[in-house]
Image (cartoon, helix red, strand yellow):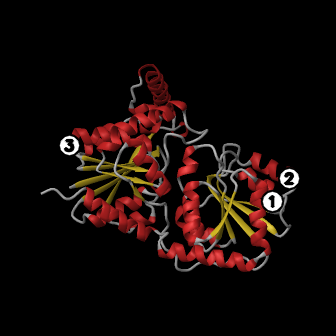
Amino acid sequence: MRICVVTSAAANAEPRGPHHAAAAQEAFPDAEVIFLDLQPQGATTADPPVLTQAPGVRRLTARYPVRGAGGLAIAALAWRRFRVRLARAWFRLTGQITEALFGAPVIGLTARLKALQADLYYAHNIDTLLPAARAAMASGGSLAFDSMEYHADMGDSQAPEEARAVPILQARWLPRCVLVTAASEVLSDVLAREYGIAQPLALYNTPAVEADLPAPPDQGLSLYWRNSVVGFGQRGLDDVLVAMTQLPADVTLSVQGRPPFDGGAALARRVAELGLGDRVRVLPPYRPAEAVKLAAVHHVGLCLERRGPANHTYTVSNKLFDYMMGGLAVVVANLPGLKVIVDRSQGGLLFEPGSPGDLAAQIRRLHADPNLRAQLAANARAFALAEGNAGVDMQRFRTALKAAFPPRA
């Protein structure tokens, strides 16, 4: 039996696929498990720790051209971008969805997956669903899908053709999946209702258990916000900067993630404009394996999502679970997916999304009452150790996978 777990992200940037590949190998020890990721030409990344600890999983990497990879790559990239424009125009004209509609990196992925002749294709990220589905049809194999996001409404970064294509694509293929997993219980309910499918298995983006944690500072109140990219927009960074102007001087903020295209210039201007130069630190990009310990040296973790994209309403960012594993109290936007975890863990406070004033009020409560902050932090850590961790989630996943895809005779 051959199982292919495929993602359009690089292995070390994909929060779920490597865990699922390793768990599939544990569920089916005699199976050949392939983890296929996508990376730009010339990029080299080590396996994430979960794959290095799963020697039975074979990693394959499909490359796509980028501007910095040389003359031939530039020509190949231009051709792929033309195909994306053509695919989106074709969709607007006919309603037909092709591989290239979801971007240049996945062009050619269908052929690559078909060549593997897998018995099960487990697609991660919406841009791999159509290639995996077509490969499964060609090989007579089964299809599974991981909905890490509410892909039909991802916000201002999503091309309009993609947003319109997602419901069509999912309506066709999700009912044919032997297993659908979702990134939250709320999202699981929504997908079951919208597509008339069995309740997807809710698997949160939880970290491995961290036994030894560094200590936070003894003085002041240290806030921490992390994102894949440190930039403004619907993730709410500006809300906490405005809130900082309403908080005592010993409240500090650390932000961490990759810099945006401007290298962080807009953030530096905004910090200076608000007079926060000595209270806001911008930390260098982090490696996912270090996320929990980097969070643990702070007091309070922030999830600042604004209302707007349905994805923010239904999903739960993995940083929330990293904060809790790191022993931080959390202050979290009062959105349905996030609220479920805060209520269950009793590990933090909720604020009105998009309201710097209410955000500041909740942070002031923690600043004024260290005992409350300590209790919330202890609750968050206890929740992380008891259920908010990858060990618990992957045991549930292995059970569901074996039930959905029993080995063939």
Q: Quadrant of residue 55?
A: bottom left
Task: Tell me the residue that label 1 is attached to.
Answer: 244
Task: Tell me the residue that label 2 is attached to.
Answer: 274
Quadrant housing the N terminus = bottom left
Q: Residue at x 56, y 72 (%)?
A: 325
Q: Position of residue 90 (x, y in %)?
A: 43, 22
Task: Tell me the residue that label 3 is attached to.
Answer: 140
Instruction: Check the image and report above or below for 164 versus 86.
Output: below
Q: Position of residue 97 (x, y in %)?
A: 40, 29
Q: Which residue is drawn at 39% across and 33% down?
A: 99
In what element is the residue under mark 2?
A: loop
Quadrant housing the C terminus = bottom left
Question: N-terminal of the two: label 1 or label 3?
Answer: 3
* Crowd band around label 2 with a 10 angstrom C-alpha radius: few (<14), some (14–19), many (20+): few
In what element is the residue under mark 3?
A: loop
In what element is the residue under mark 1?
A: helix
- Mark 2 and mark 3: Cα distance apart in space: 60 Å
Question: N-terminal of the two: label 2 or label 3?
Answer: 3
* Crowd band around label 1 with a 10 angstrom C-alpha radius: few (<14), some (14–19), many (20+): many
Of 330 and 372, which appears nearest the observer? 372
Q: Where is residue 323 in the image (x, y as percent from the top left)?
A: 60, 67
- The amino acid at mark 1 is Met
